[in-house]
Image (cartoon, helix red, strand yellow):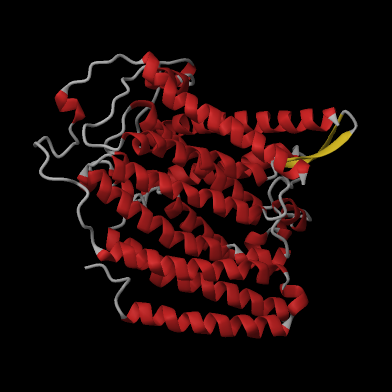
Amino acid sequence: MLIPIIIMVVKVLVIFAGLMTCVAYMTYAERKVVAHIQVRKGPLFVGYHGLLQPIADAVKLLFKEDFTLAGCNKIIYNLAPLVTFIPALLAIAVIPVGDQITVAGETTNLMISDLNVGILFIFAVSSLGIYGLVLGGWSANSKYSLLGALRSSAQMISYEVSLGLSVIGVLLLAGTLSLNEIVKAQSGGILDWFIFRQPIGFLLFVTAAIAETNRIPFDLPEAEAELVGGYHTEYAGMKFAMFFMGEYASMITVSALAATLFLGGWSGPILPPVVWFLLKMSFFLFSYIWIRGTLPRFRYDQLMRFGWLVLFPLALLNTMVTALIAIL
Amino acid sequence: MFEVYFPLLVLVFFATAIAVIMVVLPRFLGKKEITQPKQTPYECGMIPVGDARERFPVKFFLIALVFIIFDLEVVFFYPWAIIYKHLGLFGFIEMMVFVFILLVAYLYVVKKGVLEWE
């Protein structure tokens, strides 16, 4: 009884530590890649080619002054970063990062928890992050924060519908909600990947996911040209950073989910499964930064119209067409 | 049950612990020099006018209502998609009826201009 529990806890620790490292180095990768896209050099001095920059940033943020505004609701103001940050870290729990391994006579899946409603768990948990944005924007008693919070909540709930609909095609093909089973359903080779049977679903998922994580070109909540900074205008120091770490964590989750649902997860030849998983995930993360370095921002009315009048009907149509083909 | 939910609880514990540490630690590490200008909300450098918690456009409220309807629709899709292979043609026609009813609602929402932003 003791050994399985130890294995469980070790798995949680390893995956959690990996996620936190990914979050920290995602900030570094973003600065570096965007810098090179803009023909700059990016972080260069802390460690070899700035590799220790995330650690320096974390230490700096820890030593920043901790203050609250005069008119703000102190409890909610301090709670909002937690509400955004914690759920963003939880969603990784049901994503399989590798094949089964055997440790000390125990065979175990390389995922924190093989929940049979995996995808539902991810959507449920990632929706909770919106509360953090709304509460954080409202509590500061600043007009820019409130406007940013309204915008981001409206945007996120609008695109969540399309995000939820876009994966139903995959579920129809796989017939299960467990991500481990979905990976197994497409482990036969590259032609079994669901991206080839669900190309529209894939594009819809990626588009809605970018909007859901508030990234360029859908980063209206942070539109610094018109809203100063959006819902986190009045935050500083570590609490400000927690909103961004939550954002990066959900980017990583969504990339991992896209790799799992459409690119066959950890399955692949020659290289170990974990390496395949990380490669596929990194591909999506790099695309995030690439898109950020390339595209301008939408206008808010265009964004809402695109979400409801293009993405949503298309996702519905894709679902019904997939169902029709599945029955024939 | 245990082996599915116990690791989740452990993860919740670790995530909460690290988040709370990150919020509480700067309180002791950072310096304290609270001044009055630091405590006023940012409003382009001017002294803030009035309260921020005023009325806001009803549009956002409408979007929230529409979201609830269509997100519930999506939730109904999930169990249907899982057992679709067993349902066969019956499941397809049932879902077409369901989608048709919601499509009427969707067209009504579009016609009323809820999704138009002036």
Give whichever of A41, B109 is nearer the camera: B109
The residue that appears at 34% across and 36% down in the rendered structure is A77
**x, y percent for residue B83:** 73, 71
User: Left or right: where does residue B41 sit relative to residue B71?
Assistant: left
User: Where A274 falls versus B98 (above or below)?
Assistant: above
Please identify the residue farthest to the right as the structure is shown.
A105
Give whichever of A300, B29 is nearer the camera: B29
**x, y percent for residue A164:** 54, 62
**x, y percent for residue A54:** 46, 23
User: Where A317 falls versus B49 (above or below)?
Assistant: below
Counting the numbered discs, the total is 0
User: Left or right: where does residue B85 sit relative to residue A50?
Assistant: right
User: In the picture, which quadrant includes the N terminus of chain A?
Assistant: top right
User: Left or right: where does residue B41 sit relative to residue A193?
Assistant: left
Can I make out residue A157 in this image? yes
Specify the quadrant of the image occupied by residue A157: bottom left
The residue that appears at 60% across and 77% down in the rendered structure is A321
The residue that appears at 9% across and 36% down in the rendered structure is B47
User: Where A120 falls versus A201 (above or below)?
Assistant: above
Can I make out residue A111 in this image? no
User: In the picture, which quadrant includes the C terminus of chain A?
Assistant: bottom right
Specify the quadrant of the image occupied by residue A56: top left
The residue that appears at 84% across and 28% down in the rendered structure is A3
Give whichever of A302, A65 is nearer the camera: A65
**x, y percent for residue A236:** 31, 29
User: Where A190 falls versus B114 (above or below)?
Assistant: above
